[in-house]
Image (cartoon, helix red, strand yellow):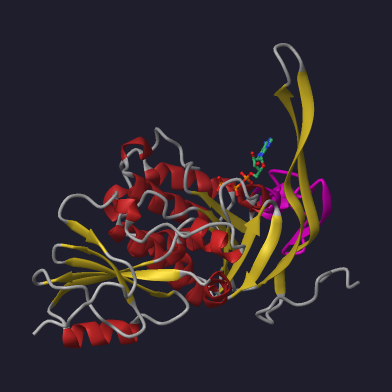
């Protein structure tokens, strides 16, 4: 086995920057077994994972709660030591040389901030500047760029504790990039953000990857993040790698469906459209599902040509549903169910059973 590239070349064919070979992480935990007794248990959080990520790739790392995503990221940063297997990032063994690795990687945890809570953003960035010994000119250039692209100008003198979640997230992403890392790990970077903030963060990450060639490993529960950013997605479940390929392939395996939410000028009978199924009607709003692996563009074009459209959006299936379908373990939730059960005046319709007419 090639020592540097134990699992061959990554699917992108690019030189590998991250390699994992049969990596495991087992936690010893004590659980109550009766009133006084506590028994030792093992939790196999990561169970023999091998993959490679090439330089400049943007890869989604997804899976249900408790699948082992964060544990993998923590091993990749050196916070946790693998119980078995071999792991290298930029040729470095993370748990052995955590400090050396720190200058090569950036990390953003959506649920936690790495910024100093009581300090204005500007002061947090000064500390990053010193900690990583970033050359002054480089630091200024990177800061200016992040401030411009992440729209942080008005926030630099605001203490972190006063920032909204979206502002804080943008602040955190900038902090992770001021030392020019080659690899960026993002753990749920758009969690809890509004639509505008999500779009800004995604746009920034796309530019970063295109212009600087930064390698990005992204964990998320939002499939739109993956769709808009990653050409490759890896699915982990119960600590094992279950899928590695394009998002469209995942949809094909899982036969998942996306939803078009269509707002019409007025109430109309359920829309009839080849390639999609109307599953719900609520006043002038209708929900149509179509195979997630297909493009929405032709459907949108036909809808716009044939119906009085006011607004339209595309909803991705949620990750749990895609994975459940992948293994035939359950049914995908009814589209639109996240909005609550159908109430009075709402008509739930099933695919193709309700006669429908085009509007005049
Ligand atoms: N320090 C720990 N001690 C014991 N068990 C742990 C520890 N950290 C994680 N685990 C367990 O390991 C498994 C994987 O957890 P992990 O946090 O990696 O999952 P995840 O995929 O990131 O989930 P989520 O999407 O909920 O963040 C879970 O069963 C979790 O309870």
Decide: is 315 above or below 306.
Answer: above
Q: In the image, what residue occupies the spot 49% across and 53% down?
A: 188
Q: Is residue 12 magenta?
A: no
Camera sees residue 180: no
Magenta-highlighted residues? 74-101
Q: Is residue 93 magenta?
A: yes
- Residue 180: x and y in percent read 55, 62
Q: Nearer the viewer, residue 27 or 203?
A: 27
Camera sees residue 119: yes
- Residue 325: x and y in percent read 55, 63
Decide: is 317 above or below 255.
Answer: above
Q: In the image, what residue occupies the spot 88% across and 68% down?
A: 3
The N terminus lies in quadrant: bottom right
The C terminus lies in quadrant: bottom left
- Residue 126: x and y in percent read 46, 46
Q: Nearer the viewer, residue 271 or 118?
A: 271
Number of marks drawn: 0
Decide: is 109 above or below 271.
Answer: above
Looking at the image, residue 83 sits to the left or right of residue 141; the answer is right
For ligand 1, give the image quadrant: top right
Q: In the image, what residue occupies the spot 42% across and 51% down?
A: 191
**Residue farthest to the right, as pictured:** 1
Looking at the image, residue 356 sits to the left or right of residue 329; the answer is left
């Amino acid at each position: 086995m090639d020592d540097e590239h134990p699992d061959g070349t990554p699917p992108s064919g690019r030189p590998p920057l991250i390699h994992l070979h049969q990596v495991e992480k087992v936690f010893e935990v004590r659980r109550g077994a009766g009133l006084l007794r506590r028994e030792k248990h093992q939790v196999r959080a990561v169970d023999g994972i091998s993959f490679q990520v090439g330089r400049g790739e943007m890869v989604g790392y997804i899976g249900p709660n408790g699948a082992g995503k964060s544990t993998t990221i923590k091993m990749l940063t050196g916070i946790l030591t693998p119980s078995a297997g071999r792991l290298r990032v930029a040729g470095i063994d993370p748990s052995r040389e955590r400090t050396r690795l720190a200058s090569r990687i950036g990390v953003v945890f959506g649920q936690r901030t790495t910024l100093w809570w009581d300090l204005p953003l500007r002061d947090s960035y000064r500390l990053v500047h010193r900690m990583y010994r970033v050359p002054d000119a480089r630091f200024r250039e990177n800061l200016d760029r992040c401030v411009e692209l992440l729209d942080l100008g008005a926030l630099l003198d605001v203490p972190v504790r006063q920032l909204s979640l979206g502002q804080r997230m943008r602040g955190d992403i900038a902090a992770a990039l001021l030392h020019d890392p080659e690899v960026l790990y993002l753990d749920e970077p758009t969690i809890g953000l509004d639509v505008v903030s999500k779009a800004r963060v995604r746009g920034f990450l796309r530019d970063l990857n295109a212009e600087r060639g930064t390698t990005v490993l992204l964990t998320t529960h939002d499939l739109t993040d993956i769709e808009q950013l990653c050409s490759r997605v890896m699915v982990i479940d119960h600590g094992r790698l279950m899928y590695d390929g394009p998002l469209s392939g995942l949809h094909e395996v899982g036969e998942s469906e996306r939803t078009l939410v269509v707002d019409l000028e007025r109430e109309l009978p359920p829309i009839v459209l080849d390639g999609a199924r109307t599953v719900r009607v609520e006043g002038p709003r209708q929900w149509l599902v179509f195979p997630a692996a297909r493009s929405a563009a032709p459907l949108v074009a036909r809808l716009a040509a044939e119906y009085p459209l006011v607004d339209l959006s595309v909803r991705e299936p949620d990750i749990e549903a895609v994975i459940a379908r992948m293994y035939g373990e359950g049914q995908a939730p009814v589209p639109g169910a996240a909005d609550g059960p159908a109430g009075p005046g709402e008509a739930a319709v099933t695919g193709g059973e309700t006669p429908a007419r085009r509007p005049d």
